[in-house]
Image (cartoon, rainbow, N blue to C red):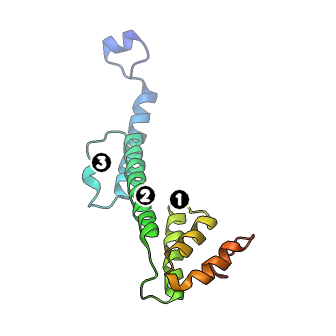
């Protein structure tokens, strides 16, 4: 805030600091204007733009991590059930794409494994055939 001790004593602030504070305030206002009103209460206590940005990052990271856990849990527990094979694989593909969109992709090999493990016993011959192949097949080939 002050350049020297004499400035501190006289109360004369550094003009560059004052300009920075004004710019930071404008930036903070701009960032806050882009936030949904339902989330604004999380940010009103923050004074500087870097604090707002960090809180946005933390909030989004928490949301993405929670979503990733939900999607991965769904993948672990998914079964074909009464769905057609096409619908079953489409659901797995949707989950996989959702994971990819939040930066947590699932490996293709793991995805094929999810499909094979979730199939009922009537598909055991197909599962055995796929497992005996040396090349990993795609979801479309499955």
Q: Position of residue 48 (x, y in %)?
A: 36, 39
Answer with left or right where residue 121 lies relative to residue 11.
Answer: right
Estimate the spatial distance between the alpha carbons at disc 3 and disc 1, rounded to whole Å. 27 Å
Query: Vertical placement of 31 versus 85: above or below?
Result: above
Q: Which residue is mark 2?
A: 64
3 vs 1, front mark? 1
Residue drawn at 38 percent across, 59 percent down = 34
Label 2 close to label 1 by CB (< 8 Å): yes
Answer with left or right where residue 140 lies relative to residue 29.
Answer: right
Dot 3 crowding, Cα within 10 Å, few <14, some 14–19, many 20+: some
Dot 2 crowding, Cα within 10 Å, few <14, some 14–19, many 20+: some
Residue drawn at 39 percent across, 19 percent down = 2
Q: Which residue is mark 1?
A: 104
Q: Which residue is mark 3?
A: 43
Q: Position of residue 123 (x, y in %)?
A: 56, 84
Estimate the spatial distance between the alpha carbons at disc 2 and disc 1, rounded to whole Å. 9 Å
**SS label for mark 2:** helix
Mark 3 or 2, nearer chain start: 3
**SS label for mark 1:** loop
Residue drawn at 42 percent across, 55 percent down = 65
């Amino acid at each position: 805030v002050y350049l020297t001790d004499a400035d501190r004593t006289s109360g004369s602030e550094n003009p560059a600091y004052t300009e920075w504070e004004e710019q930071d305030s404008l930036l903070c206002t701009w960032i806050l204007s882009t936030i949904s009103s339902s989330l604004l209460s999380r940010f009103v206590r923050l004074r500087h733009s870097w604090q707002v940005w960090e809180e946005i990052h933390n909030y989004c990271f928490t949301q993405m991590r929670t979503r990733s856990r939900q999607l991965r849990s769904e993948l672990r527990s998914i079964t074909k059930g009464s769905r057609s094979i096409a619908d079953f694989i489409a659901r797995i593909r949707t989950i996989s794409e959702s994971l990819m969109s939040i930066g947590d992709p699932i490996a293709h090999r793991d995805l094929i494994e999810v499909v094979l493990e979730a199939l009922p016993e009537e598909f055991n011959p197909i599962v055995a055939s796929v497992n005996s192949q040396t090349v990993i097949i795609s979801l479309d080939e499955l």
